[in-house]
Image: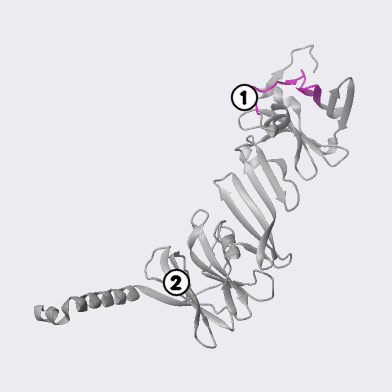
């Protein structure tokens, strides 16, 4: 053995070791065909031969006519599901489902199908990320702008061929999501609408804050009730006779009693917590102003500056009156759609901290 080593020399032994290592690396990897997905192109994926979910590997795309490799993307982490000796392309279960290593689709709506090749798990929360190649008259060209959409959000972007638009989603924890919509101009995606959906955070518990920014317009912020997250318990709800609006009185998970006037599309036009306590203005108070319930449970009243709000729940009077400067406006409720009643507030085991029960003789 010593003679053999002396015969090879030091340089020869190093070359032999490198060659043996390369053979071992090749033996530890397997190559699978992808598809078929096109009459003009075919592809393969080579991954480490292990039972790990995330495996290092590479995706190669070939011109079927010439056999020439035209795209090669390496990755530290690929997710590959092999069935009957091959890998299925064009799987895109968004945002969190399975996404294949190769997606063949028209991303820029020019009538030619483009390629998205998985390059690892670099998108949000260790999700799949892609390099995007747009089809040209002479082949494919890597697009930095489209690739950015498949890197900085949650997984691959969604393509809507009917509206010729693209959309992305990203999130932070359970309670903040961003949804973006893009139109394509000059082979570049252009942001036209962005919606941020936030639960809690700067919003009080039980409300969902929606921030919408559209191209050429000012940002618009709206609020909606979130019964599931806020664990809201409805006390009284009824539609108004006019305007398509509705009224709801409810108790939050922290036992705060609240009132909200909702528009036909579910947005909160006015509420005790947002507008009286001050969360809509960013001036929420720790000490809540009182709501007062009349004896008998027919009237619930609270003040907002010079305005006095009274929710009426009597057999002959259902609605909301707003009194100010010796004037009064009454929003009549539709009793046919009424649910619940204010009287139940007199019998709660855990009384809301902002609710005061009026004694006999007092009438809010």
Which residue appears at 58% of the width and 83% of the height? 40
Extreme-right residue of the structure: 327
What is the CA distance from the residue labelled 1 to the residue labelled 2?
57 Å
Q: Is residue 280 above or below residue 172?
A: above
Q: Secondary structure at mark 1?
A: loop
Q: Position of residue 249 (x, y in %)?
A: 73, 31
Judged from the image, the secondary structure of the residue bearing numbered disc 2 is strand
Q: Quadrant of residue 131?
A: bottom right
Q: Which residue is mark 1?
A: 286
- The region drawn magenta spans 284-311
291 in magenta: yes
Tell whether 245 sits left or right of 95. Answer: right
Which is in the foreground here, disc 1 or disc 2?
2
Please name whichever residue, 273 or 182, is drawn nearer the observer in this view of the structure: 182
Place of residue 231 in the rendered image (x, y in percent of width and height, measured from the top left): 63, 37
Residue identified by numbered label 2: 58
Which one is in front, 150 or 209? 150
In the image, is residue 274 above or below residue 32?
Answer: above
Please indicate, yes or no, whether residue 232 appears anywhere in the rendered image: yes
Q: Farthest residue toward the bottom?
A: 65
Q: Please indicate whether residue 316 sits to the left or right of residue 11 in the image.
A: right
Mark 2 closeness class: few <14, some 14–19, many ≥20 residues within 10 Å: many
Could you tell me residue 281's position as x and y percent? 70, 32
- Contact, CB < 8 Å: mark 1 with mark 2? no
Residue furthest left in the image: 2
Nearer-N-terminus badge (1/2): 2
- Quarter of the image for residue 106 reads bottom right
Q: Residue at x 61, y 30 (%)?
A: 254
Asked if one can make out residue 250 in the rendered structure from this viewpoint, the answer is no
Q: Would residue 166 be found to the left or right of residue 54 on screen?
A: right
């Amino acid at each position: 053995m010593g003679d053999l080593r002396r015969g090879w020399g030091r340089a020869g032994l190093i070359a032999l070791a490198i060659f043996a290592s390369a053979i071992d690396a090749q033996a530890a990897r397997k190559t699978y065909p992808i598809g078929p997905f096109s009459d003009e192109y075919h592809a393969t994926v080579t991954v480490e031969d292990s039972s790990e979910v995330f495996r290092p590997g590479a995706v190669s795309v070939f011109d079927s006519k010439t056999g020439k490799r035209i795209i090669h993307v390496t990755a530290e982490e690929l997710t590959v599901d092999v069935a009957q000796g091959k890998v299925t392309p064009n799987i895109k279960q968004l945002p969190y489902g399975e996404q294949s290593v190769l997606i063949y689709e028209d991303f820029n709506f020019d009538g030619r199908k483009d390629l998205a090749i998985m390059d690892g798990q670099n998108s949000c929360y260790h999700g799949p990320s892609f390099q995007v190649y747009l089809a040209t008259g002479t082949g494919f060209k890597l697009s930095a702008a489209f690739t950015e959409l498949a890197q900085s959000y949650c997984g691959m972007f969604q393509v809507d061929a009917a509206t010729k638009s693209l959309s992305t989603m990203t999130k932070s924890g359970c309670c903040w999501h961003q949804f973006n919509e893009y139109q394509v101009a000059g082979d570049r995606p252009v942001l036209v609408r962005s919606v941020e959906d936030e639960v809690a955070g700067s919003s009080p518990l039980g409300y969902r804050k929606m921030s919408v920014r559209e191209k050429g317009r000012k940002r618009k912020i709206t609020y909606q009730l979130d019964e599931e997250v806020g664990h809201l318990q409805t006390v009284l709800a009824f539609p108004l006779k006019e305007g398509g609006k509705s009224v709801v009185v409810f108790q939050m998970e922290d036992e705060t009693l609240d009132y909200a006037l909702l528009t036909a599309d579910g947005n909160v036009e006015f509420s005790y917590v947002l507008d009286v306590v001050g969360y809509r203005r960013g001036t929420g108070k720790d000490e809540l102003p009182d709501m007062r319930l009349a004896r008998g449970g027919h009237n619930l009243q609270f003040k907002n500056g010079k305005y006095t709000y009274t929710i009426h729940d009597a057999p002959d009077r259902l609605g909301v009156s707003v009194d100010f400067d010796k004037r009064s406006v009454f929003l009549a409720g539709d009793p046919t759609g009424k649910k619940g009643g204010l009287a139940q507030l007199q019998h709660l085991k855990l009384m809301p901290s902002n609710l005061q029960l009026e004694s006999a003789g007092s009438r809010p």
